[in-house]
Image (tube, rainbow, N blue to C red):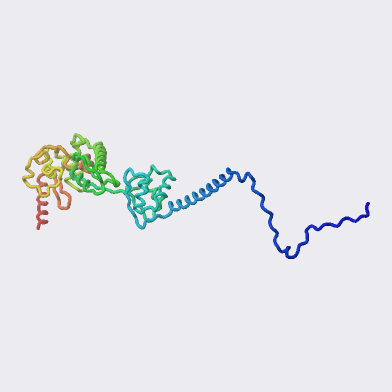
Amino acid sequence: MTDQAPPPLKPLIAPRSPRAALEPESAPPPPPPSRAARHPFIVVGNAIFSLLLIAIMLAFGAIYIGRNAFEGPGPLAETKIVYIPRGSGIRDVAEILQRDGVIENQMIFIGGVLVHGARDDLKWGEYSFPVRVSMQRVLETLVEGKSIQHQVTIPEGLTSEQIVQRLRENPILIGEIRQVPREGTLMPDGYRFTRGTTRDQILQQMAQAQKKVLAEAWAKKDPSVPVRSPEEMVILASIVEKETGKADERARVASVFVNRINRKMRLQSDPTIIYGIVGGKGVLGRAILKSDIDRITPYNTYQIDGLPPTPIANPGKASLEAVAQPARTNDLYFVADGTGGHTFADTYDAHLKNVARWRQIEKERQQ
């Protein structure tokens, strides 16, 4: 044990003057960068990472903007009809849509098509786009192929030449008709088509429809009907078609001609006189004269026995069915009744009275 006192403790912080105490202390200098941080590979890697990060951010921004533009309302201020020609590629379609004001940006539309995997699904045709239609809806419309449907209506009883003329006059159909189809081989009806359809394609549809309807009518033919082939059925149906336009009369008019054939009587049909004179033109343009009735042609059933050599028009389904299953009557004659229909008779005397009544109606109309 010692008696010496311990040495005095040194102050932990040297006393500073009041002015020095108010001054901030300087920060220690940063440590020098490590040699690894200054390595060129690290510097390049950091730069690449930064650029990649920026690119990703820009890409996501572009996708967000593009998606909104693709799905959002478009620029159309009013409904627009646009025609996409057959064989158009994705760039052609985009250019047409932008040119017609349906879309604002071709590249966004093309990008949307590619994202949806629809590059090869765009269908040609004529389309109607509504106001403010989005690019997404435009794409759906082109993929679905919901193009505008037009219609051409061919009435029953026209000749093939008259039908061809109607198709030639249609401003939407395209292409030349190479050949007028044979008489009686076309089915009158309404046919729907899209812009770009050819006239020959409509004729092909009509021919296919006629074959189908004729086969069905022939399969239902009453065995007592004196026609020996589908071709003869068409010939007789064409005469029925030209004789009456009233649906409820066709089967009865058909019965008159069936009864006449069975009795070896001449058909004596006025429309056959006309066809023998004007052929496929179909319209005489005047009343039938006595000299026309006496004129011998292959079609004049006042002068020939049996059926003419070909149809005199293209009959519709109802006339073919009327010949296949005619009404069961004893009628041998009919004449116009002044109301658009006919008066029928089973004897010549009764027919003469009906003819006199019709002539009186004509006389009164002329006064």
Nearest the viewer among 68 and 206 is 68
- Residue at figure coordinates x 39%, y 53% from the top left: 104
Classify residue 186 as left or right of residue 111. Answer: left
Is there any visible trace of residue 96 in the rendered image? yes
Q: Position of residue 167 (x, y in %)?
A: 22, 46
The image quadrant of residue 315 is: top left
Classify residue 82 as left or right of residue 347. Answer: right
Q: Position of residue 129 (x, y in %)?
A: 36, 52
Q: Position of residue 24 (x, y in %)?
A: 70, 61
Is there any visible trace of residue 329 in the rendered image? no
Classify residue 98 as left or right of residue 300. Answer: right
Say how many tags the image has.
Answer: 0
Quadrant showing the C terminus: bottom left
The residue furthest bottom is: 18
- Residue at figure coordinates x 37%, y 56% from the top left: 76
The image quadrant of residue 240 is: top left
The residue furthest top is: 228
Nearest the viewer among 253 and 116 is 116
Q: Position of residue 331 (x, y in %)?
A: 15, 43
Nearest the viewer among 285 and 260 is 285
